[in-house]
Amino acid sequence: MRLTARTSRAVFGGAEETVYVGCRVIAVVYGALAVVQLALVPGTAKWVLATVSLLSAVAGVACARRLRTADAATVDRLVWVVCTVPFVNSVLFIAATGQIAPTMVMLSTVAIGAVATQIRPALVLTLLGVAAWGAAVLAWGPHPPGAVMGHAINLGLACALAFAVYSIRALTGERLRLAELRLTQRLEELDEARRQLEALSTTDQLTGCFNRRGWDDRVEALHRLARREDASLTLGIVDLDHFKEFNDSFGHRAGDELLSTFVRHASAAIRDVDVLARWGGDEFTVALYGCSVDEATAIFQRIGQTDAARTTCSIGFAQVHPGESLQDCLTRADHALYRAKRLGRDQVAHCSCEAGTAACHEDGQLTAAI
């Protein structure tokens, strides 16, 4: 299974994997070829051929081991070494035996097409190899009647085979490149769609601030951070005063614009670490991280000090006590909000009582209407 995976990656691209497979194939093939040459080739030629084959096998093993720590430039050099070995063996076979081995040369050509990680070196080596083969044929090969024509046919067949191999490889590589590009684009589109869906699920569509789900996610994270860092966490509820009357008097479009204007102003009044969410209708919730009561009061007063809207707001807040749940703290903030409304609205009220009680006291009155 492991060899199959490596071979598959070699066929479809990947410089290191391709050259690695080529090196191992060369080592095995030429190691076996050396044994065959020693057993079957007559005379002293077998020693020359076997030596060259063994050196080729050693070169394949060395290249395969070198690839484990090779950089890109070294891989390119090893490509040339791996591609040159088959042609060198073919030419030396002709020189040593005086016999033409067209099948061997054509297989060498195919090996280059399978091993080469770049089209340009493969083509250059093919041309050089075919030229060297032709020169070896003219220098050492026998020339009976019709042999020259046979050699020419073999040369043409080798070139055609090489062209076919390189063309298929180039076409496959281009198709894979385009498929990879389309896949990358598709993944980016899916990731963008996921982000948009996530934003839609946590964002109030009218005002652009968080909705209840977004509030739960962000404030739970702030609560965990506050417990871990031993920091304070303040929760507040903001209610726009007489919003229903405003909506009935000026229309829903004006009411929507009022809500959006308030969110823009409130977002500018809080810090990046704080959280603003639309709780529902004209109610908003605010979470302030690491603030004292006085600092929280000042921030809530800034939220109420705006000339951009034509209404006021009432605000109640409470700090989360150790061991208290967020829901219990919001309940106390809600008690403070109702106290602010009973005191005449346009108020900031703070509840310092324990969870489950409603003994909240007024902290002060807003200095400016919204």
Image (tube, helix red, strand yellow):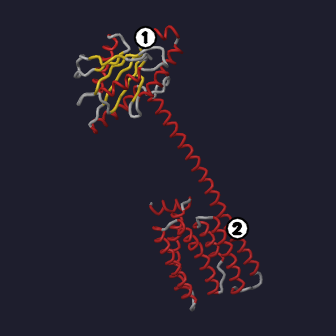
341 with respect to 194 (left or right): left
Q: Which label sits on residue 242?
A: 1
Q: Nearer the viewer, residue 125 or 347?
A: 347
> How much space separates mark 1 and mark 2, taking CA atoms?
87 Å
Residue 41 in picture, x, y percent from top left: 57, 86
Residue found at x 65% / y 57%: 171
Q: Residues within 10 Å of mark 2 (few under 14, many from 20)?
A: few
Residue 85 drawn above or below residue 2? below
Q: Secondary structure at mark 1?
A: loop
Residue 299 in picture, x, y percent from top left: 37, 26
> Sequence order check: which comes first, mark 1 or mark 2?
2
The amino acid beneath tag 2 is Ala
Q: Residues within 10 Å of mark 1 (few under 14, many from 20)?
A: few
Q: Secondary structure at mark 2?
A: helix
Q: Which label sits on residue 137?
A: none
Q: Nearer the viewer, residue 118 or 263?
A: 263
Label 2, on which residue? 160
Q: Nearer the viewer, residue 300 or 9?
A: 300
The amino acid beneath tag 1 is His
247 with respect to 43 (left or right): left
Q: Quadrant of the C terminus?
A: top left
Residue 13 drawn above or below residue 182? below
Badges 1 and 2: C-beta atoms under 8 Å apart?
A: no
Residue found at x 32% / y 18%: 364
Residue 167 drawn above or below residue 58? above
Q: Nearer the viewer, mark 1 or mark 2?
A: 1
Residue 294 drawn above or below residue 121? above
Farthest residue to the bottom: give it: 43
Q: Nearer the viewer, residue 229 or 161?
A: 229
Residue 215 in picture, x, y percent from top left: 39, 28
